[in-house]
Image: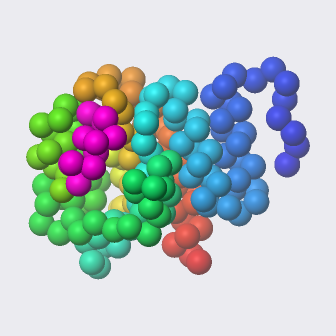
Amino acid sequence: MTSQPTSVTPALAGVHAVALAYAAADATAAFAAIDAYARASLEHTLCTVNRYDADAMRVVRLYSSNPKAYPPGGSKDKNGTPWGRHVLLEQRVFVGEGVDAIREFFNDHDAIRELGLQSVINVPVVYGDTCLGTVNFLMTRAQVSEADVDNARLAALLALPAFLALRQA
């Protein structure tokens, strides 16, 4: 792959970093580049990427921008939860705004609160009719805009090649 042109926007530089990670067949580097790309528009504090295990109705963390608080390999059971139905089964973006929404939908709400996080955008990554996982952005502000949701959706789409590669591995 050629080097990055000298006159590119930060967004294009971010996409270039994602492309370089894919050229190296490095899913973790791609997730880190997607995190950095999205940070420019979302100003999120925490980004996690989870693989979805439909048989167990669990998500397993593949990437975390804060591995001390949320280490890769951690998992959460989503069987029977409103969030699991909404995001994993219905394949819809979840937006949680404010500490009450975080408390209502996430068992680890205390850990989220301790990090000063007050809002979340969870984007399902879908191929065909299959949810492969989620890309999750958590912010310190209590509210998010429609533009934030759109930017989160775009960033999550960049993760699709990594999810497909991991599914084949």
Q: Count the marks.
A: 0
Residue at the location (51% across, 72% down)? 167
The stretch of residues the image draws in magenta is 108-120
Looking at the image, which is closer to me, 113 or 88? 113
Q: Residue 156: x and y, percent?
A: 47, 45
Q: Residue 51: x and y, percent?
A: 42, 65
Residue at the location (33% across, 40% down)? 115
Task: Look at the image and tell me whether residue 140 can be seen.
Answer: yes
User: Which quadrant of the structure image shows residue 149?
Assistant: top left
Q: Residue 35: x and y, percent?
A: 54, 42
Q: Is residue 66 left or right of residue 121?
A: right
Looking at the image, which is closer to me, 76 or 6? 76
Q: Is residue 166 above or below residue 152?
A: below
Q: Is residue 54 left or right of residue 37?
A: left
Residue at the location (66% across, 46% down)? 18
Q: How is the image coloured?
A: rainbow
Q: Is residue 167 left or right of residue 94?
A: right
Looking at the image, which is closer to me, 58 or 93? 58
Q: Residue 116: x and y, percent?
A: 31, 35
User: Which quadrant of the structure image shows residue 103?
Assistant: top left
Q: Residue furthest right?
A: 2
Residue at the location (48% across, 38% down)? 154
Task: Look at the image and tell me whether residue 120 can be seen.
Answer: no
Query: Is 97 one of the magenta-colored residues?
Result: no
Q: Is residue 93 above or below residue 38?
A: below
Image quarter hosting the C terminus = bottom right
